[in-house]
Image (tube, grey):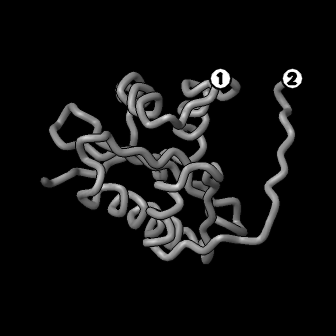
Amino acid sequence: MDFHLRPFAPADTAQVIDLWNAAGLTRPWNDPVIDIERAHTTWPENFLVATDTPVHIAGTVMSGFDGHRGWLYYLAVTPEHRGNGLGSKLVHEAERRLAAQGCVKVQLMVRSDNAAALGFYDALGYEHSDVIVAGKRLDG
């Protein structure tokens, strides 16, 4: 199947959130509407959707670049399109865009119990790092 990759548009919001919920990417402490608004405002060219028809979103990926490292976020593919290369296509396009911005290293976070995602990224050449990710909420 042919997929069209394009930047996110605000009209995509409901479908994107449905996809992220179905893929298990959302968490109660992260409002997907706010994440979408921030990404679309900050990196509009790096928030991509893949469509299998002009109106059906089959996948998403966000990427960001802070001048030092690139990051991948919210890679999701609908269940019916998993295993056919769409996830790889989204990652490669995100990497291409980051490289064009001067990024030389891209990172991502995967929950430690998500063996399928870890295997997917391993197959794409991502290496596990011996680091601890620490975080602090600033929104209360």
* Residue 28: numbered disc: 1
Q: Nearer the viewer, mark 1 or mark 2?
A: 1
Pointer 1 local density, CA inside 10 Å: few below 14, some 14–19, many at least 20: few
- The foreground one among 111 and 6 is 111
Real-space Cα separation, disc 1 to disc 2, in angstroms: 14 Å
Q: State the image coordinates of residue 120 (x, y, percent, origin top left).
A: 44, 62
Q: Residue at x 79, y 55 (%)?
A: 133
Q: Measured along the vertical axis of the image, is residue 46 above or below residue 107?
A: above
Q: State the image coordinates of residue 92 (x, y, percent, origin top left).
A: 40, 67
Q: Residue at x 32, y 48 (%)?
A: 6
Q: Residue at x 53, y 55 (%)?
A: 115
- The foreground one among 79 and 59 is 79
Q: State the image coordinates of residue 58 (x, y, percent, origin top left).
A: 28, 41
The three-letter amino acid code for the residue at tag 1 is: Pro
Left or right relative to 107: residue 122: left
Residue ID for mark 2: 140
Q: Measured along the vertical axis of the image, is residue 98 above or below residue 135?
A: below
The three-letter amino acid code for the residue at tag 2 is: Gly
